[in-house]
Image (cartoon, rainbow, N blue to C red):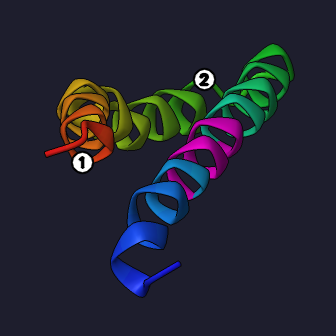
């Protein structure tokens, strides 16, 4: 298997890790917010919007990479 063949699988795993980290950070954000740090929680949510914003593009690109030529 060539390096080129491994790239899509690697990127899928990296994307899965990114989404798992996003979920974990959101859980911590809710916990922080419940303890009175609403401003901190809002800042974290703002930072996480980049993941949401890019998710569809990443999925589409990965699907294209996995499609046989």
Please determine whether, in this image, residue 16 is positioned above or below residue 32.
below
- Label 2 Cα neighbours within 10 Å, binned few <14 / some 14-19 / many ≥20: some
> What is the x, y in percent for residue 26?
67, 28
Residue 48 falls inside the magenta stretch? no
Task: Quote the CA–CA distance across marks 1 and 2.
Answer: 40 Å
> What is the x, y in percent for residue 63?
28, 32
- The residue that mark 1 highlights is 65
Contact (Cβ within 8 Å) of mark 1 with mark 2: no
Task: Using the image, tell me which numbered label, if any, was put on residue 38.
Answer: 2
Most foreground residue, 31 or 68? 68
Front of the two marks 1 and 2: 1
Task: Using the image, tell me which numbered label, if any, was put on residue 55.
Answer: none
> What is the x, y in percent for residue 10?
53, 64
Residue 15 falls inside the magenta stretch? yes
Q: Main secondary structure of the magenta part?
A: helix
Residue 65 appears left or right of 14:
left
Residue 28 appears left or right of 69:
right
- Label 1 Cα neighbours within 10 Å, binned few <14 / some 14-19 / many ≥20: some
Most foreground residue, 35 or 67? 67
The quadrant where residue 55 appears: top left
Query: What kind of element bears circle 1?
Result: helix
> What is the x, y in percent for residue 41?
58, 30
- Residue located at (77% from left, 36% from top): 24
- Residue located at (47% from left, 27% from top): 42
**Marks 1 and 2, the one that precedes in the sequence:** 2
Magenta stretch in the rendered image:
14-21
- Residue located at (75% from left, 19% from top): 30
Query: What kind of element bears circle 2?
Result: helix
């Amino acid at each position: 298997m060539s390096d080129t063949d491994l790239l899509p699988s690697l990127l899928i795993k990296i994307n899965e890790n990114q989404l798992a980290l996003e979920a974990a950070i959101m859980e911590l954000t809710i916990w922080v917010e419940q303890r009175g740090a609403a401003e901190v929680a809002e800042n974290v949510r703002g930072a996480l919007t980049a993941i949401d914003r890019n998710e569809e593009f990443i999925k589409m690109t990965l699907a294209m990479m996995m499609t046989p030529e």
